[in-house]
Amino acid sequence: MNSFDWKLLKSRYLIKDKWLSLRTDTCQMPDLYTHGYANSVSAGSEVNAQRWEFNEHCKAILEGYGHPLPRYGATEEEVLAELEAQGATLETQIAAQWRVEDTVSKLIENQENKIQSAAWSIPDDIFFRAIQDLRNWALERYDSLDYILPQQREFKIVVVRNWA
């Protein structure tokens, strides 16, 4: 059985007529794949340390205004830990790695444009003051908005086996 084989356990038609058939199947799959690239910055990498500092300072500024960025859903680590607790075995493969080099100006612009949905709930008057505080801090910290903050990213595939 290869990784894409599945076993049909039960099948039943919900609709079956001359022009339309709708069937529901219950299947057993040997593996479950989750995948995605690491879009969040981890301080664990020396390359990512300054980017981590930048993001954490941005969060701290918003918290100082009484508007911490909300967290939605579980993290990948929490999901994988729960799968392991349920008896799953995990195999992680790094399919690709690459380096992104953004200027401080670009990162501030991204924040200003609210590209992350967590920022959408912050009132504009507070948000724009926080962005100005971030810009002032960044100029003091990096001496230039053209300073490059690199980030190491990766595309990984997690194969989950033996999960009930």
Image (tube, grey):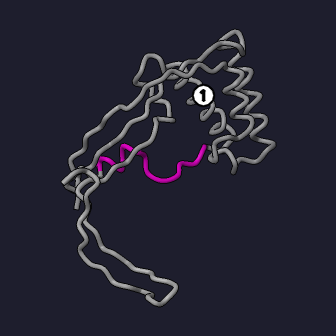
Depicted 127 relative to depicted 5: above or below: above
In the displayed structure image, the side of residue 47 where residue 133 appears, left or right: right
Q: Mark 1 points at which residue?
A: 57
**In which quadrant of the rendered view does residue 100 lie?**
top right
Residue at (37, 48) in percent of width and height: 34
Q: Where is residue 27 in the image (x, y as percent from the top left)?
A: 28, 69
The single residue placed furthest to the top in the displayed view is 143
**In which quadrant of the rendered view does residue 10 lie?**
bottom left
In the displayed structure image, the side of residue 150 where residue 130 appears, left or right: right
Write down the region rendered in magenta. Answer: 69-81
The single residue placed furthest to the bottom in the displayed view is 17
Residue at (63, 31) in percent of width and height: 58
Depicted 141 relative to depicted 88: above or below: above
On-image quarter of the C terminus = bottom left
Residue at (34, 49) in percent of width and height: 33
Q: Residues within 10 Å of mark 1 (few under 14, many from 20)?
A: some
Q: Where is residue 96 in the image (x, y as percent from the top left)?
A: 41, 28
In the displayed structure image, the side of residue 78 where residue 19 appears, left or right: right
Q: Where is residue 60 in the image (x, y as percent from the top left)?
A: 60, 33
For badge 1, the amino acid type reads His
Asked which secondary structure carries label 1, the reply is helix
Residue at (43, 34) in percent of width and height: 155
Q: Position of residue 135 (x, y in %)?
A: 73, 23
Residue 79 falls inside the magenta stretch = yes
**In which quadrant of the rendered view does residue 140 lie?**
top right
Q: Nearer the viewer, residue 92 or 22?
A: 22
Residue 104 falls inside the magenta stretch = no
Depicted 15 relative to depicted 87: above or below: below
On-image quarter of the N terminus = bottom left
How many numbered circles are shown? 1
